[in-house]
Amino acid sequence: MNLSTLILLSLGLGIGFGAILNTTFPTYIELINLNILVPVGESFLRLIQFVVVPIVFSSLIMGLTRIQGAGQVGRYTAKLVTSYVITSTIALGVGMATAYLLQPGSGVEGFALPESLEVTVAPSLVTWLVSLIPTNPLEALSTGNLLQIIFSAVLLGFGIQLAHEQAQPFVKLIESIYHISEKTLSVILYVAPLGVFALISSVIAVQGLELIAKLFLYVLGLFIASTIMIAIDMLILATLKADPLRFLRSLAEAIALAFGTASSNAALPVVLQNIQENYGLREEIASFAIPLGTALKRDGAAILQGFNALFVTQIYQVPLTPSLLLAIALSSLLVSFSTPGVPGSAIITMATVLSAAGLPLEAIALVAGIDRLTDGFKTVVNIIGNSTNAIILSHWESEVLTDTIAT
């Protein structure tokens, strides 16, 4: 069996094991979860994160050395941000429309607020933009701040282009780091089925399947919205004649890993590897667009924020007015771009959307328990949307190149 099949099989076994543990052996949950499942799952995530920074940084540098000057970098960024805004707006609309039509909040009773839940409000746009500039590139690398790493790589890329031959030893070093990190990743992925098994087993054992039954319409709604958005991405690829089926087959490992880990950051190195080696996306496009999209592009978060906000209005029977819908839409779209690519992050930043819309923050408790079980849907949507936008950029740039040659 290939890796993607093994990971999916591990997911199924993990769900079954967690359910048995939750229903049949509840007295052993804490012992097995804290001493086996949690350590194994966290160890796997740490191993994946071990190669995220070197692969992202080195692939960005290698890609930027192939990009001709600041003008091309600026053009790539402008085109990506434009497609990000358009497709994220579509994702937000899908999430809000699904919640409006399905009415998952009707008749739902509240749950107790978890003591460990912490809600945060996103910083202002100006503060966030200033924070993208690192004061120390080594600190950005050591903390794994993807946006600061991208900023550092772009600056160094300009320096490499200006230094010409004198930069070649550094470029050779970066190429070595990339190839070593790629081989290290291939070794780490051997334990992916075990890590995914532990992660999903832990969630099901602690939360139980009964929570899904209580919020069935909520889970179903998010699944439907995620499926619709993936279908829209496939339609975009078909329009571009980019072979959607080959695209999905190429990203099979990354999709399985994204669903199992519920972390866009953890899936990033595999997405980068799959989209280049399996699908054949140009290296200069992939090495720039995929890391940038992982840091910014969150279609899953856009779906979640819009869906959850309407879910809350239904629970508290808040009338939907044009001003309320506008507040939800704008805040959800902005928050989706600043949501970290780690498990559970979107539910934490939900506080910003609820505050902007004047909705009660206590409603976060209603979905906090179920979020980890649905996080896999959102992460899959994130990486498929990110990869689709990278292909959009590739086709967009191919048209520019064709026009240039014709001229």
Image (cartoon, grey):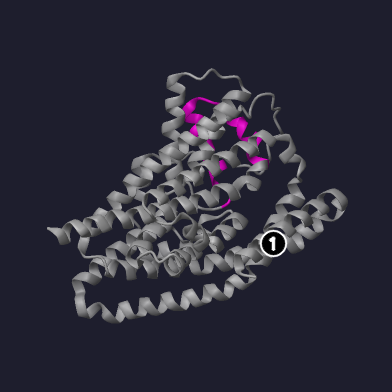
Closest to the observer, 344 or 245: 245
Magenta residue span: 343-369
The secondary structure that most of the magenta stretch takes on is helix
Is residue 26 depicted above or below 322 in this figure?
Answer: below
Tell me the kind of residue under disc 1.
Answer: Leu
Q: Is residue 324 magenta?
A: no
Left or right: 358, with 15 as reference point: left
Query: Where does the image place residue 347, in percent across and percent down from the top left?
Result: 57, 41
Task: Find residue 402 and report its image quarter.
Answer: bottom left
Query: Where does the image place residue 32, in percent across and percent down from the top left?
Result: 79, 60
Which image quadrant: the C terminus? bottom left
Left or right: 40, with 179 as reference point: right
Residue at which label 1 appears: 9
Task: Find residue 317 and report its image quarter.
Answer: top right
Closest to the observer, 227 or 299: 227
Can residue 338 be seen here? The reply is no
Query: Where does the image place residue 145, in percent across and percent down from the top left?
Result: 44, 58
Query: Where does the image place residue 321, in percent across and percent down from the top left?
Result: 47, 18
Residue depicted at x 43% and y 38%: 90
Residue situated furthest left in the rendering: 407
Q: Quick one: SS at disc 1?
A: helix
**Within 10 Å of the Cα at label 1, are there few (<14), some (14-19), or many (20+) other Cα atoms?**
some
Task: State the count of labels.
Answer: 1
Is residue 166 depicted above or below 358 in this figure?
Answer: below
Left or right: 353, with 59 as reference point: right
Residue depicted at x 61% and y 27%: 103
Q: Is residue 364 magenta?
A: yes
Which image quadrant: the N terminus? bottom right
Task: Find residue 186 and report its image quarter.
Answer: bottom right
Can residue 113 be seen here? The reply is yes
Residue depicted at x 65% and y 60%: 8
